[in-house]
Image: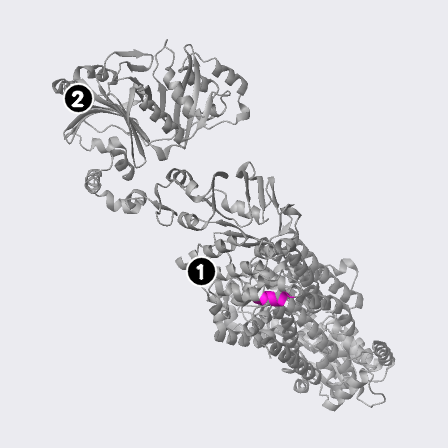
Amino acid sequence: MTKTKVIYISLTIGLVLVILFSLGMGAMKIAVMDTVKILAKGAGLVKNVSVDNLAENVLLYVRLPRVLLGLLVGAALGISGAAIQGIFRNPLAEPGLIGISAGASLFAVLIIGFEAVLFVTLGNILGFYLLAFGAFAGAGLAAMLVYQFSKTDGKPNVATMLLAGIAINALAGALTGLVTYMADEQQLRTITFWMLGSLGGANWNMIWGITPFVLIPVFLLPFYGRGLNLFAIGEHQAEQIGMNPNKIKSGVVILSTLAVGACVSVTGIIGFVGLLVPHIIRLVGGVDHRVVLPASALLGALVLTLSDMLARVLVAPVELPIGVITALLGTPVFLYILYKDKKKILQ
Amino acid sequence: MEIRSWSWIYAFCLLFFYAAAGTAQPKRIITLGGAITETVAAMGFEKQIVAVDVTSEFPANITKLPKVSKNRSVSAEGLMAYRPDLVIAPEGDVPYGVIESLKGAGIRFVALKQEYSVKGALTFIRAVGAALGVKARAERLALDTEQRVNKALQTVKASTQKPKVLFIYARGTGTMTVAGKGSSMAAIIELAGGRNAIQEFNQYKTYSTEALVYANPDALLLFDFGMESLGGKNGVLGMPGVAFTTAGKNKNIVSVNGPLMINFSTRLDQAILALHRAIN
Amino acid sequence: MLRIASVSYKIGKRYLLKDITFSIRKGEMVAILGANGAGKSTLMKILCREKQPTEGNIVYDGKNLNDYTAKELAVKRATLYQQNAISLAFTVEEVVLMGRYGTEGTDADQLDRTALRETMEICGISHLAERSMLTLSGGEQQRVHLARVLAQVWDNKEALLLLDEPISNMDMLYQHQTLAIANALAKKGYMVICVLHEINLAAQYADRVIMLKGGRKWWDGAPEEVFTARNIFTAFGVHTTVQTNPRTLITQVTPNGIKFDAAAFNSNLAREYNKLSLKERFVSYRDEYPAQPLWQVADVLSVSEADLMLLGLGENVTLLRPEMDHILQCIEGIGVVKAVTYNPYCETERCGVYRNFSKEDFTTLFLDEDIDLRIFTSRWKIALAAEEMGKESLQFYDVSGRAVHKVYLTDASYRQVYLGLITRFRDDRQAVPRIEKPVRKRMEERRDAEIDIEEFQKAWNNMQGTHDFFGLIRKFRLTRMQALRLAPPHRAMQISLESFRRTIIQCSVTETPVMMFTANEGCVQINTGKLDRINQNTSWLTISEASGGKVSFNEDAVHSVWHVVKPTADGNVNSLELYDTEGELIVQFFGYRKPGIAELERWREALGSNLL
């Protein structure tokens, strides 16, 4: 069995286990048999089983969407992180670098800040989705601006993209700070909720809403594997081998923005996953993007779902911020691999 | 796994209507917020409260209950795990997604808004009563509270002094804010016969030495834990600029019980009297 | 077949490449050489389609290069870049296989594996297959990239290989091995274009060499044709000795080497060093290199010749009052002396008496058969008398301390007159005069479009004497080179140095009297007579005239040779003029003539038979 197969199989097994545990654990104790019964009933496999109404509600309307959201967001962050690192030829790159997070934050904060002007109260359904749409639009707009600014002679230039990204991030950050400063107590609370990044708001509408935006990139990005491999030896070199580097760049930027923008818009900003997950994959399974991309999606989903489960369970009934868990969980693993295998990434 | 979404939405709707139609008195209540907990308890529902948030400190027995919200970090499942039939929270303290999940699970959620005035306190009591389905009891409690507050206000009127009070909210020297116009502390200071030292801005703003000296208050007011975090009365006196104020010169630094001051509910009279005594 | 037709590339108004034309056949390995900034890399970037030429086009196998899709090109052209940074820890095998990403087909997998195995084997990286690229040395990495590039076109024997400085990081073995691989592939049909810095490697492995200079193609041919000492000096500014290995018949180029004194360019070292006086430094240097001429010593020590001479003030050197015309007038009394005139690449000498002193406007003239001088004394700033190793002389320097003219005493001189002259003109103060740093003031060449070429050509055709030429270029504000370039038809023709040599040799055989003009800013010395011997010593060509006069010049410094025809009242006057890379005149040759007498027919014959 090849190394690649081992990685895929262990990631899949891990992911299934994490999903099962996530569904079974939470502030509310639901017996294993009940869990199975409720899921079977929900899937229409069995009828007329008596289950606790509240347990059913918690499982089907709170936990299940939350686990699914974790899977989607984790996969999106993992695969986009790997792809963005690929086109920037920089292991420190992450989707936030091209302005996705900063743009989303700015628009979210703007909508919260000017809600009075817009005659929308964020407590209601329209307000909530307005926020999500706004954040998505902000992510897309920022990434598009960065992309446009990065063009030299009509071709996107990676170094300029990095600089443009830094500039747009700084600008969006400053404007976000300004709006935050002007916000009143109530708005500040909403802004804080949003900025913290949490899967807590998961519901089925949200899942239906972001699924296409996440799944399309997750299934299309692996096709850029060869192209991104060639990027590692240089854009010009890639072109000499018959690839069109500009198509790769625009494809990766658009797909990553779609995926990460959609996630950020419903969960707020969750750091770390996009940065470290691809690294862990590379350290374990080599740097071939044809493996790194799909494996990062799997590991991202696994890490985020696991982190969310721990965030829910560790100090139940309250929750820990998920960013704390992802960092606490991922950093030691990463440092261990780094320590053991540092030759793989350093001379 | 095949997901039959239509049946789910159907179930969702049914539960929602069931919940809305239920007017029976709640049996398991989660109260998020000190004022709400205090008021619900005062209406005789203390035994029905199953979980609270970290700001709920009165009545004393309540503090033994599990705390399901910390700094507004609250999860749907964390609430549901206590199988409540009613969750009451201040408006804006619970994220939209959580409210949706609660409603989806047939749990009644009531968000209450609080105005920091005598009238606001009475309205708040009545609103809590409405949420609990005990309007008559609430009305009696409101009238009783009004009488006690009026009595307290008369005591306040008897004194002619109107000291200028600056409230500092502190959690260590790193986090200090002062109360401006329209804040809950400004309201209680006015009721207790003082004047809020800051009239230039609304709500709470970051503390600065210059603003302190400029406001030149007759008294500095802190919460008990705030005073402690700054190292007691001497600690506060030692802060830059304090010595230049009347309060500093007269060593007029006072502390009061925080939750009592800002709850603006059934114990408003006690709050007024306590603060009045402290600043005079 | 690859055809590059009139390709130019410019940024703004600056041409990085100008009018490059050549074609390459299947089976040819071409090396491109040139100094830094000559345009090699730009040319490679255009060939690999990274840059688009501003003018001209490239046709590859009957199809314009731009009409290929990237995928089509990928199977018939592979490029090895000079820099190949890799950002991720790919294994060697993975990188080599990347070269195969562009190939598709039914048996692609089989071909991929063959290409992988064979390229890794020949590039000597088979044992590194599983290693991470980041753990390899620069040379090893470059070999991996070479294998990747070879793998890309391994199964297309008509492909084009573009190698941009492929060997710069490699050790000696792989430098040779890499070029040998390229050469061997070329022998089987591949086309190889390779940018190289190492002349000897190019000579050894390339079938053909193209040398670029200043964005233009200067030479194109077999290595043994292109690599001559003169071409190499022109392209790189390095003096070399070129030989052919008698056994292998391969051209071997040995640079003559450059010698610096660090104190001359590092002021920190100079501080230590400057504690030594200039005199001590001069003496120690002179002891170390006794054969070096004074101007070279002055160059190394970053001072002027006059500075060095004046070190002997009070000992062997006496400073004279700069009353140049008076001094010059008195030289006649010394009798037979040797007059020497210098410019940077040429030196002339002749014995005789300074007769017939006359003054015409600003020009001092000595018109005699032997001593024939035009002197601009306004340029002469320092006069001194010196005794060096028993030789006594009067020496004249310009404001920046450069020697313009020297007068050496001979056995036939009246030494008493010389001593009297020194006594008479001795400067009372004997203080070192001010010597300025040399400033190079060159006339900026105007664009041809700004010049009234028609008028200029008419004026040229109406010249009445050779001296009118100066007025002509001043009037039209031209540099000399520009004037020659824009001359009327058949008035100025560029010829090869070889033709020049043949002409001069014929003149010496036919005993044709020739006038040789050696000029600097302060003085023109004319050596007239029948040519006697022509000697070559390294790069210096010495032409002797029957009565003992000599002209020596440095052939390496010759940038162009022109045959110029000026109309005069006495008919056309033909001259041969040698210019350096800056467009400055080194030396000029005329047939013997005098105003009123037509040019010698023999001179015309010598020109006519050798210059066509």
Residue closest to the far top: C596
User: Is A33 situated left or right of C403 in this image?
Assistant: right
Type of amino acid under label 1: Gly
Judge if badges 2 and 1 mark residues of a common chain.
yes
Give the total of numbered labels: 2
Query: Which residue is more in the foreground, C389 or A145?
Result: C389
Residue C123 location (% of width, % of height): 48, 62
Q: Identify the residue under disc 1.
A: C139
Vertical relation: A156 (above or below) A332: above
Tell me which label, 2 or 1, sits earlier in the chain: 1
Looking at the rendered structure, the secondary structure element under dot 2 is: loop
Query: Coloured how?
Result: one colour
Callout 2 crowding tier (Cα within 10 Å): few <14, some 14–19, many ≥20: some
Mark 2 → mark 1, Cα distance in angstroms: 68 Å
Does the segment drawn in magenta span residue A334? no
Q: Identify the residue under disc 2.
A: C426
Query: Which residue is more in the foreground, C110 or B257?
Result: C110
Location of the N terminus of chain A (image quadrant): bottom right
Q: Is residue C264 visible?
A: yes
Residue closest to the far left: C416
Query: Which residue is more in the foreground, A38 or B93?
Result: A38
Residue span colored magenta:
C107-113
Image mark 1: chain: C
Residue C188 location (% of width, % of height): 53, 54
Q: Residue at x 38, y 14 (%)?
A: C599
Residue A217 location (% of width, % of height): 70, 66
Q: Quadrant of residue B207?
A: bottom right
Looking at the rendered structure, the secondary structure element under dot 1 is: helix
Image mark 2: chain: C
Q: Quadrant of residue A224?
A: bottom right
